[in-house]
Image (cartoon, rainbow, N blue to C red):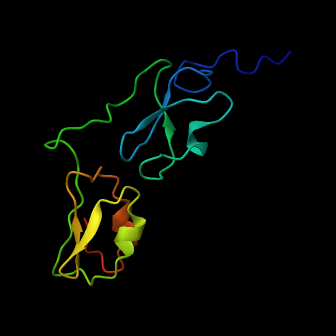
């Protein structure tokens, strides 16, 4: 007789509708949808694939980081060529052009770092 799943440990997988899905990039949390693996969900803030929180009912990581702990993208203005690709890549509109160079709006940046891969000259870190 096959009893697959009976020995499944409570490691954050197969926990039903409880728990949350957590973004590994910007730490945004969304409620888990039963029957839909978290990795099939997309973060509403940065577009990354979500992952499952470790326990059912866990509230996840706090999405309201303080300015001192929040990671903010930095642009090297000497390297920036003003191509604007980072502006269209930023999912929350935290980049603007200032004097022909990209500029991060620190109050809006959530640290998802999606912009870094869009820069053709690696001016964003």
Q: Residue at x 57, y 42 (%)?
A: 39
Quadrant of the rendered structure where residue 61 is?
A: top left
What residue is rendered at 35% in x and 53% in y? 112
Which quarter shows the C terminus?
bottom left
* Residue furthest out toward the left: 68
Instruction: Please tell me which residue lies in front, 74 or 51.
Output: 74
User: Residue at the location (63% across, 21% down)?
Assistant: 16
Q: Is residue 49 left or right of residue 114?
A: right
Work out whether 124 lies above or below 16. below
The correct choice, above or below, for 98 with respect to 10 in the image is below
In the picture shown, does residue 5 fall above or below 89? above
Toward which corner of the image does residue 89 lie, by quadrant? bottom left
Number of marks in picture = 0
Foreground pick, 80 / 125: 80
Quadrant containing the N terminus in the rendered view: top right
Q: Picture coordinates of residue 68 (x, y %)?
A: 13, 43
**Residue 124 image position (x, y, % from top left):** 26, 69
Residue 113 position in % (x across, y down): 33, 58
User: Residue at the location (36% across, 45% down)?
Assistant: 26
């Amino acid at each position: 007789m096959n009893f697959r799943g009976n020995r499944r440990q409570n490691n954050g997988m197969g926990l039903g509708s409880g728990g949350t899905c957590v973004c590994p990039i910007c730490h945004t949390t969304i409620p888990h949808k039963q029957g839909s693996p978290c990795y099939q969900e997309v973060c509403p803030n940065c577009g990354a694939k979500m992952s499952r929180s470790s326990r059912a009912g866990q509230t996840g990581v706090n999405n309201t980081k303080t300015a001192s702990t929040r990671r903010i993208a930095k642009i090297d203005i000497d390297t920036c060529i003003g191509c604007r690709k980072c502006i269209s890549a930023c999912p929350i509109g935290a980049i603007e052009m200032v004097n022909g160079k990209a500029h991060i709006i620190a109050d809006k940046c959530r640290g998802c770092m999606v912009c870094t891969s869009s820069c053709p000259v690696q001016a964003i870190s």
